[in-house]
Each structure stands twice: as structure tokens, then as C-alpha cells.
Image (cartoon, rainbow, N blue to C red):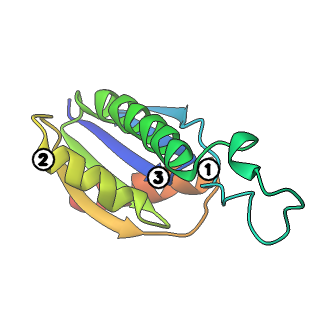
Amino acid sequence: MPKNIGLWIDHRKAVLVTLEGKVEEIRLIQSGVEQQTRSRGGAHMKTTHTAQYFPAEDHQDRQFIKKLNKYYEAVIAALRSADSVLVIGPGEAKCELERRIAGGKAPVRIAAIETADKMSERQIADKVRRYYQKRK
């Protein structure tokens, strides 16, 4: 039986809908990152020594990228057993994931990539079911 996965992804979470025969499973992977934080220093600071009180922006950027890398690796690991993957999502995360898969040695077959706004788990599962039913 083919194992098809639908993946809704953004930088905060990934919702995987696995379809294998009549069995449907929904799995959630959290990234652990919040939106990239902006510098807390600047014109509104009262002291001249702000660098010693706040982490450097490059440190925050490195932490953000480190968490995203870990997140993408977890998502790719969950997709490895799939025969076909439908990737949907609202922003850049779906394209970043596609580049990682294409650039790496991950044996993940992406069937299609679609743009979709925020969706509930039920809406995601419905979209994935309809997509794979049309392909039969």
C-alpha cells in the first residue's frame, strides 16, 4: 500500500497527515522558535552600555537558525518513509524545506507544493485526502 503524506508547514509548526490505505494519522511537530526577535536596543534605551545587557543580534540569529535546522531535520526524518509528499503552507518554510531536501541526500519524493493560508488540522487532512483521491 502506498504511504502518502500531506505536510502543512510554517516556521513554527508542521502538521503531517499520513494516509496509508484507509488509515489516517495526524502528527504535529513544533519548531520551538518564535518569530525572529528584533533588537531590543536602539533609540529608546536610557543607558549607553546596552550591549552588555542584551544578547547580540547575530547571536539571536544563530539561535534562530540552529532551532530551524533542528526542526527541518525532524520534519525530513518524518517524511523519509513516504512514497509521495504534498507540501502546503503560507510562507517561505515550504520552499526552504524543498531546497534542503533537494540539496541533501534525503530520499523524499515531493509530489507538489501549494500555497495555503492558516488551516485547522481538519482542513489540512481534508485537503490532503482530496489531493490524493484525485491522483488515483
Dot 2 or dot 3: first in sequence order is: 3
Residue 23 vertical position relative to residue 121 in the rendered view, above or below: above
Q: Work out whether residue 136 can be spotted.
A: no
In depth, the one of 68 and 12 nearer the eye is 68
Q: Which amino acid type is marked by label 2?
A: Gly
Q: Which residue is mark 1?
A: 122
Quadrant location of the N terminus in the rendered image = top left
Q: Residue at x 58, y 57 (%)?
A: 123
Q: Which amino acid type is marked by label 3?
A: Trp
Q: Which amino acid type is marked by label 1?
A: Arg
Whole-number angstrom distance, CA of label 3 to CA of label 1? 12 Å
Q: Secondary structure at mark 2?
A: helix
Crowdedness near tag 3: few (<14), some (14–19) or many (≥20) residues, C-alpha within 10 Å: many
Residue placed farthest to the front in the image?
A: 48
Q: Residue at x 43, y 44 (%)?
A: 65
Q: Which residue is mark 2?
A: 103
Dot 3 or dot 1: first in sequence order is: 3
In depth, the one of 37 and 117 nearer the eye is 37
Task: Tell me: 133 left or right of 84.
Answer: right
Whole-number angstrom distance, CA of label 2 to CA of label 3? 21 Å
Residue 23 vertical position relative to residue 40 in the rendered view, above or below: above
Q: Which residue is mark 3?
A: 8
In depth, the one of 24 and 73 nearer the eye is 73
Task: Tell me: 121 left or right of 115.
Answer: right
Residue 78 in picture, x, y percent from top left: 34, 29
